[in-house]
């Protein structure tokens, strides 16, 4: 199979720590170049990775014969880069959120469909092994009818300043953290979602919110979703109650009960054995970032457009987040930044 040439746009930690290593380690892809606006950062990464760097995505696309573009830039630039990549026939992996608004995301989805390229939004949670186990259990209705779902996703405040600029980020913690949870929820309950109540607030007098909460209905299944930039180490927990059991999970631990039988996993793995005091689990190599990028690379190499999170999922997620802001009385006057 022909090796696909990848161009990475943006040279921050997401690109250098995850995208470049993952595409480099995949059997069907190689990183050919990157683009970075900041001159000093571009020079540093050029030296560290021995890759040609360009001042913007357009220059990279013009100079390199690329098969894949991987977008690791602020959300305000996503649409322009995505459309330029699609126009020259590149497959695209785009970090979440797909766009600043549902309207922007729809334009991107339409362009990808018309061009026939492979595209995926870079949601993370579904690639943790515990989430994979939980999604499989729910898809097979092992918990019976779902009574309620509670999702809490709280992390440290971002270090990059663009997160706090609405014109660049499209919002605060709701736009940042809700997408991962919404993607996993939609994988089980579908994309028909109603926002019944929502609120956002800022703790630090920033122009974007630090705390967000939403009450959702997935065709009658109630879901409570909360997120904040308040924790040093971060916490992300899901509790699902059904008529035949329950489960609770985060990236490390999945536990619960089905038909009266308790279970517990760590990183998607059952205990090796029980010594009577505590269960002993094997060492974990759970790497969700590499898993999601390799999954996209597999689809791109095969020309398979049925990715786990196509642009249509990005549109559905953006519609929910737009509704959260509307319910909260927040007006977002955002424009796509021209990164072309």
Image (spheres, rainbow, N blue to C red):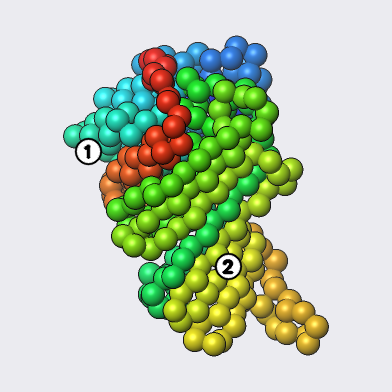
Residue at 19 percent across and 34 percent down: it is 114
Q: What secondary structure is marked by label 2?
A: strand
Q: Is 20 located above or below residue 180 in the figure? A: above
Residue at 46 percent across and 66 percent down: it is 148
Report the front residue among 294 and 114. Answer: 114
Q: Are marks 2 and 1 in contact (CB under 8 Å)?
A: no
In x, y percent, where is residue 229?
64, 39
Dot 2 alpha-carbon crowd within 10 angstroms: few under 14, some 14 to 19, many 20 or more: many
Dot 1 alpha-carbon crowd within 10 angstroms: few under 14, some 14 to 19, many 20 or more: some
Report the front residue among 59 and 80. Answer: 80
In x, y percent, where is residue 303?
28, 46
Residue at 41 percent across and 21 percent down: it is 334
Q: Which residue is mark 1?
A: 113
Q: Which residue is mark 2?
A: 248
Is residue 98 visible in this depiction of the protein? no
Q: Is 61 located above or below residue 189 in the figure? A: above
């Amino acid at each position: 199979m022909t090796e696909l040439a990848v161009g990475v746009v943006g040279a921050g930690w997401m690109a250098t720590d995850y995208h470049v290593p993952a595409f480099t380690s995949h059997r069907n892809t190689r990183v050919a170049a990157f683009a970075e606006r900041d001159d000093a950062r571009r020079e540093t990464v050029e030296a560290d990775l021995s890759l040609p760097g360009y001042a913007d995505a357009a220059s990279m696309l013009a100079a390199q014969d690329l098969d894949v573009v991987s977008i690791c830039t602020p959300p305000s630039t996503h649409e322009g880069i995505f459309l330029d990549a699609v126009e020259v026939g590149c497959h695209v992996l785009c970090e979440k959120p797909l766009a600043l608004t549902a309207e922007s995301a729809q334009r991107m989805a339409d362009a990808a469909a018309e061009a026939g390229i492979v595209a995926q939004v870079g949601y993370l949670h579904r690639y943790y092994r515990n989430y994979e186990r939980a999604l499989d259990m729910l898809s097979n209705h092992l918990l019976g009818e779902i009574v309620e779902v509670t999702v809490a996703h709280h992390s440290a405040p971002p270090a990059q300043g663009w997160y706090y600029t609405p014109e660049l980020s499209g919002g605060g913690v709701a736009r940042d953290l809700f997408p991962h949870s919404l993607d996993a929820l939609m994988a089980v309950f579908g994309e028909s979602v109603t926002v019944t109540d929502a609120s956002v607030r800022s703790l630090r007098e920033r122009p974007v919110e630090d705390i967000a909460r939403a009450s959702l209905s997935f065709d009658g299944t109630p879901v409570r979703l909360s997120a904040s930039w308040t924790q040093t180490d971060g916490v992300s927990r899901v509790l699902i109650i059904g008529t035949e059991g329950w489960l609770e999970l985060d990236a490390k631990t999945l536990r619960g009960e089905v038909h009266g039988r308790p279970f517990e996993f760590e990183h998607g793995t059952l205990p090796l054995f029980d010594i009577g005091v505590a269960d002993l689990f094997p060492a974990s190599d759970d790497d969700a970032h590499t898993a999601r990028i390799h999954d996209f690379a597999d689809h791109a190499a095969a020309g398979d457009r049925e990715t786990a999170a196509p642009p249509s999922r990005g549109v559905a997620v953006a519609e929910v987040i737009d509704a959260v802001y509307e319910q909260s009385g927040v007006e977002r006057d955002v424009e796509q930044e021209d990164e072309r």
